[in-house]
Image: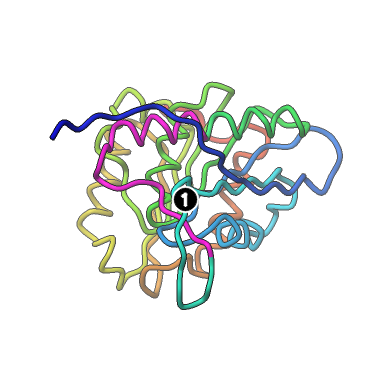
Amino acid sequence: MTERSIRTTIHGRYLVIPAASPGPAPVLVGFHGYAENAEAQLERLKSIPGSSRWVIVSIQALHRFYQRKANLVVASWMTRQDREQAIADNAAYVAACLDAVRAECSTQASVVFAGFSQGVAMAFRAAVQWQGGPAAVIAAGGDVPPEITADQLKTLSGVLMARGKSDDLYPRAQFANDTQRLLNCNVKVSALEMNGGHEWAAELLEPASEFLEAHFSGAGFSPGE
């Protein structure tokens, strides 16, 4: 047997809520967790106080399947199979979504990428590849991808790292290692351990709001600050 891979075209979906106020607005981009959909992450982003001032974008993973119990269509970002190709496909997909959003909406340069669980890795990958202006990350319940280099991490304008104290899927040791890894790259990091487990907890909303406010005009944290 010979295994080969082939490039193909697939359609993805993303949800957009324009900013409530007229004029250019920063962009808040969300990535859901495993077996979730774009609607789930959109609701999380909408719940952050002050997020209505942002163009909110929730991107759904390309690999869809059925969640039988609730009869929902959900998705996954990737598996370990053909990992490098999947990373490249996802990066191109996210870039295309953001190009379309910026063509449709009046936007500022500042972008915050917000991920939950499996979506955290996507948030970091998208942020370090973003070329349009300052990029920051809100990461809840997921780790920093191992393939991202120190030079790439140094480009981030800030990171809010969060985990639940009883989260077995994102252990405290990994959380501490990720935080230190960012600090070693001179990234401005806010580290938050919340009550609860593997979830986007209500305790995260106010710190996330303050984080967004610091990045609203793109003049918040500077890389290496």
**Whole-percent x, y for residue 119 in the image:** 43, 50
**Residue at 32% across, 43% down:** 144
**Whole-percent x, y for residue 49 in the image:** 67, 59
Instruction: Classify 122 as above or below 32.
Output: above
Residue range in magenta is 73-93
- Residue at the farthest front position: 1
Left or right placement of residue 144 versus residue 96 in this view:
left
Left or right placement of residue 106 versus residue 73 in this view:
right
**Mark 1: amino acid:** Gly
Q: Quadrant of residue 46?
A: bottom right
- For label 1, the SS is strand
Instruction: Classify 60 as above or below 183.
Output: below
Q: Read off the residue under disc 1.
A: 115
Left or right placement of residue 192 versus residue 102 in this view:
left
**Whole-percent x, y for residue 110 in the image:** 62, 32
**Whole-percent x, y for residue 160 in the image:** 45, 49
**Residue at 71% across, 45% down:** 54
Q: Quadrant of residue 8?
A: top left
Q: Can residue 149 be found in the magenta stretch?
A: no
**Residue at 42% across, 42% down:** 122
Q: Quadrant of the N terminus?
A: top left
| Type of colouring | rainbow
Q: Quadrant of the C terminus?
A: top left
